[in-house]
Amino acid sequence: MLPSNIESLSSQPQTPKKFKTLVKNAFTSLHPNISLHPHQCLFIFLILSIHFFVFFLTRTPSASLPKSGLSDDCNSGRIYVYQLPPMFNRELLSNCDDLDPWHWQCGIATNNGFGRRAREFERILPASLAPAWYRTNQFSLEIMYHHRIMNHKCRTLEPELATAFYIPFYAGLAVGKYLFDNHKVQERDFLCEILLMWLQDQPYWKRSNGSDHFIVLGRITWDFRRLTEPKKLWGSSFLNMPSMQHITRLTIERAPSDYYDIGVPYPTGFHPHSRSQILEWQSFIRGLNRSRLTSFVGATRVDIKNDFRGYLLNQCRNENESCSLVDCAVTQCSNGSTAILEALLDSNFCLQPRGDSYTRRSIFDCMIAGSIPVFFWKRSVHNQYEWFLPAEPDKFSVFIDHNDVMRGTSVKRVLEGFSKAKIAEMKERVIELIPKIVYAIPGEGVSNNKDAFDIAVEGVLERFRKQ
C-alpha cells in the first residue's frame, strides 16, 4: 500500500467559487457525450462532485506531520509534493478490474509499486540474492516514484522554499483504463483535463505556469499524445494540452524531439536492499559461464506486415544451440519469469527489436542480467536515456540495422565476429551500469550509490535550478 502520510501533506485550499468553476468546466467537457451515454456521464459527474465537495471540506493543513528536516545535501533545491484529491492517484489503485488484462495486476500497488516477492527465483539464484527480486509491473513507475519522493531528503512542506513541484497524478493508470476498449475521446481525456483545471488554481502554478513542475508517467510518451488524430482509438491527448507544455515529464520512453520528456529506465524485478547486495549481484553475473551466444524474449505481431520480431523469433528457434528463446505467446512475460531470467543469465547477447514502440522493458531486464543488448533501431537507445547510459552506445551494446537483417545479414554471424576480449569488455561496461538503472528498496538504500530514482530526481532539481 502507499504510505499513509500521502493524506497528511498540506496544500493550498480552494475557495467555493473555484470549486464551482471546476465542476462546471468538468460538466462542459462531458456534455458532448451526454446524449450518447447519459447514465455513464451522470454517474461520472456525481462522483466528481462528491470527490471535490469532500475534498473542499477537508482542506485544512495537517498538524500530524512535522516540518521535514531539510538536508544539507540539497544544493540543487527542494521538492514540494502537491496533495491531490485521491481520485487522481490512490483511488486509481482501488479499482483495477477494468484495466488491461494482459499487463495489469491488482497487486501493482503491493509494496509501494515494487510488487510481491518473486519467490520462484529462489531455485535459480543464490539465497542471499533472491530476496532482492520482485514481480514488478512495468507500468508501476508512478507509484514507486510517489512513495520515494514522499520520503526524499529534500522534500519540503513549505512551497515557498521549493525549487520543484511534484504532481503525483497516476496518469498512466488513468489513461490505461481506456486503452483496450472502444472508449470515447472524452473518457480518455477526462481525468487529465480535470487535473489540469485543479493545478491552474494553485498559486505556485500561476507563478511559473508549470515550468518548475514535474510529473512521472508510467507509460510511454506515445500513450499521451493523440497528435493530429482526435478520433484515434488509443491513448489520450494529455501531453498536447496547453497546460502541459512546460511541465517536465519523467517517462519510460520519451519523444526524442521534446525537451520536456526525460527518459528514465523501465522498472525491472531487481530491487537491491543495500550497496553490498549490488556488489554481490555484480560479482555473481560477472562469474557466470554463459553457454549461449544470444537470447530472444518476445512474441510475434501477427497483425504487422513483415513482422521483424517474428523474423528474429524464427531465426532464434532455428538456431537453438546458440540462441535461447522465450516465446511470450507461450510463456507469461509481462512481469518477468524464471524462464526469462534463466535465458538472459545464460547468454552473452540479447536481441532487442522494437515492440509496440521503440523501447522495451526487456532492454533493462537484459542489462540487469549482465547480457549485452543488440538493437535494430537507433531510437531504441539513442537520445532515450541520456542521464543513465553512456553517450556512446557501442561501448555497451551492438547495433545491427533491421533493414540489413531483412536483406539477409545474419545476426548470428555478426555477433560471432566479436572477440572474447571485446565481449568481456562490453559485458563489464553493462555490469558497471547496473547501479544507475535499478530502483533500490527505499529505507535501507544503496549507500553512496545513486540509483535510477536518485539520478532522475536530482537531474530535475538541477535543471530547474539552472532555469
Image (spheres, rainbow, N blue to C red):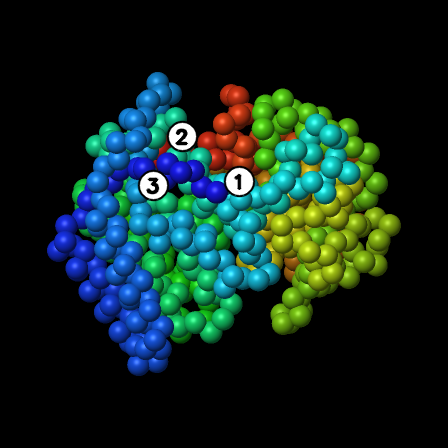
Q: Residue furthest right?
A: 321
Mark 2 Cα-neighbour bin, 10 Å: few <14, some 14–19, many ≥20: some
Q: Residue furthest top?
A: 72
> SS class of the residue under badge 2?
loop
Q: Specify whether residue 166 is in view.
A: no
The residue sitting at 80% across, 44% down in the picture is 293
Q: Position of residue 413 (x, y in %)?
A: 79, 50
Q: Position of residue 93 (x, y in %)?
A: 46, 52
> SS class of the residue under badge 1?
helix
Disc nearest the viewer among 3 and 2: 3
Q: Residue furthest bottom?
A: 35
How many circles with numbers are drawn on the protein? 3
Residue 18 location, quadrant: bottom left
Instruction: Residue type at mark 2: give it.
Output: His
Residue underneath mark 2 = 152
Disc nearest the viewer among 1 and 2: 1
Residue underneath mark 3 = 7
Instruction: Say which label, 3 or 2, has the lower sequence index.
Output: 3
Residue 207 location, quadrant: top left
Disc 3 to disc 2, C-alpha distance: 16 Å
Q: Position of residue 373 (x, y in %)?
A: 66, 44
The numbered disc on residue 111 is: 1
- Nearer to the camera, 265 or 256: 265
Residue 41 location, quadrant: bottom left
Mark 3 Cα-neighbour bin, 10 Å: few <14, some 14–19, many ≥20: some
Disc 1 to disc 2, C-alpha distance: 17 Å
Q: Are marks 3 and 2 in contact (CB under 8 Å)?
A: no
Instruction: Residue type at mark 3: give it.
Output: Glu
370 lies left or right of 323 = left
The residue sitting at 30% across, 26% down in the picture is 66
